[in-house]
Image (cartoon, rainbow, N blue to C red):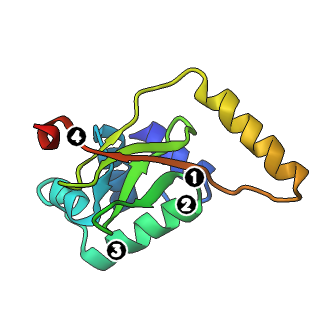
Amino acid sequence: MEQLAQTLRRHGLRATPAALAVLHALDQAAAPLAHDAIAARLATSSPVDRVTLYRILDRMTCAGLIHRFQGPDRTWRFSSNASGSTASIFACTRCHSVAPLPAAPDLPKALAQVQDKLRQQGLTSLATEITVHGLCPRCQG
């Protein structure tokens, strides 16, 4: 937990018990989580009221510590940005499940090329999110 506290402080955030619990829950999640799913994970060990959880998620998103994206069901989901990676997910258009994309070694190079093209046009990118829409194995069958 001390490493998580240092991460929060490095991003200009206070290392409160609630913030630590939220960051820990996101770090342990295999896929991005909606607000309700985060609250459910914290319910037994570190309950956090809904408003506090929204505020923590908002602060962490603004600080660049976590990714926030809206899924095909229009629900905001959050994922850890511990490695500083790009938010990249697969979203099923039928059941609205989401899953992280597998690591692709060529992706950083392709994104760097996109960033270069944007800079050439005088544009500054603040965040990059990749969402692949399709059908999960369960919905294909």
* Corner quadrant of residue 113: top right
Q: Which of the two labelled residues, at mark 2 and mark 4, occupies the earlier sequence position?
A: 2
Which dot marks residue 36? none
Q: Are marks 4 and 3 in contact (CB under 8 Å)?
A: no
Q: Which of the two labelled residues, at mark 4 and mark 1, occupies the earlier sequence position?
A: 1
Q: Amino acid at mark 2?
A: Leu
**With respect to residue 33, does 87 lie above or below?**
above
Q: What residue does disc 3 label?
A: 52
> Regarding mark 1 in the picture, which secondary structure is present there?
helix
Q: Are marks 2 and 1 in contact (CB under 8 Å)?
A: yes
* Residue at x 82% of width, y 45% of height: 117
* Residue at x 80% of width, y 51% of height: 118
Q: What residue does disc 2 label?
A: 13
Callout in the foreground (4, 3): 4
Give the distance between the C-alpha atoms of the residues marked 2 and 1, in whole angstroms.
Answer: 5 Å
Q: Amino acid at mark 3?
A: Thr
Q: What residue does disc 1 label?
A: 9
Front in this rendered view, residue 5 or 130: 130
Which dot marks residue 136? 4
The number of numbered discs placed on residues in the rendered structure image is 4
**Which quadrant, please, contains the N terminus?**
top left
